Amino acid sequence: MDQRHTATDPELEEIRRTALDYIEGWYDGNTERMERSLHPNLAKRIVVPNGNYWAPGDRLDEMSALSLIQRTQRGPKPVNERRTEVTVLDRFENAASVRVDAHAWVDYLRVIKWNGRWVIVNMLWELRPETKAQSA
């Protein structure tokens, strides 16, 4: 981490709060928190490996901010299916990288300071191995 940004840096807490708005908003079914955490042009992507006959090779699936907010509306998730570990990996000026360890997946967030507040502009995510095995 950039040595100029220490644990006492107030920006780090705002970045962490943005990530928590995202993941806790998801778990609680709270669309207000989810929407607050996302840039309107968000892209959340995952690589889906091993295509099939019709579409050989890897595929890149994408969710927009709107689709993520709509999925959040489905309501709260069970308490035993929640994990909200947030790690700010790096920050430089108005850009940051954050890792969110959720129950069934890991997100890598790209967070920017936009119009005076921190929002998520991009996410790459990957299912945990045990989740992949259950969905196969």
Image (spheres, grey):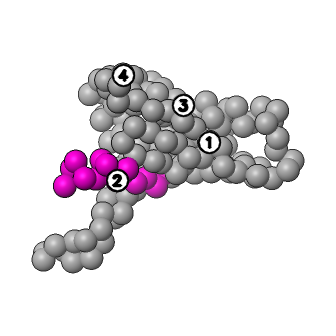
Say whether marks 4 and 3 touch (CB < 8 Å). no
Say whether marks 2 and 4 touch (CB < 8 Å). no
Which mark sits nearer the N-terminus, 4 or 3?
Answer: 3
Q: What residue is pinned by disc 2?
A: 129
The secondary structure type at the circle numbered 3 is helix
- In-front residue for pair 53/18: 53
Residue 85 appears in which quarter of the rendering?
top right
85 left or right, relative to 55: right
Start-end of magenta stretch: 123-136
The residue at the point 37 percent across, 50 percent down is: 128
Say whether marks 2 and 1 touch (CB < 8 Å). no
Q: Amino acid at mark 2?
A: Pro
Q: Nearer the viewer, mark 2 or mark 1?
A: 2
Q: What residue is pinned by disc 1?
A: 87
The secondary structure type at the circle numbered 4 is helix
Q: Nearer the viewer, mark 2 or mark 3?
A: 2
Say whether marks 2 and 3 touch (CB < 8 Å). no
Disc number placed over residue 78 in the picture, else none = none
Distance between the alpha carbons at the discs numbered 2 and 3: 23 Å
Residue 56 seen in the current view: yes
Which mark sits nearer the N-terminus, 3 or 1?
Answer: 3
Distance between the alpha carbons at the discs numbered 3 and 1: 10 Å
Which mark sits nearer the N-terminus, 2 or 4?
Answer: 4
Distance between the alpha carbons at the discs numbered 2 and 1: 20 Å
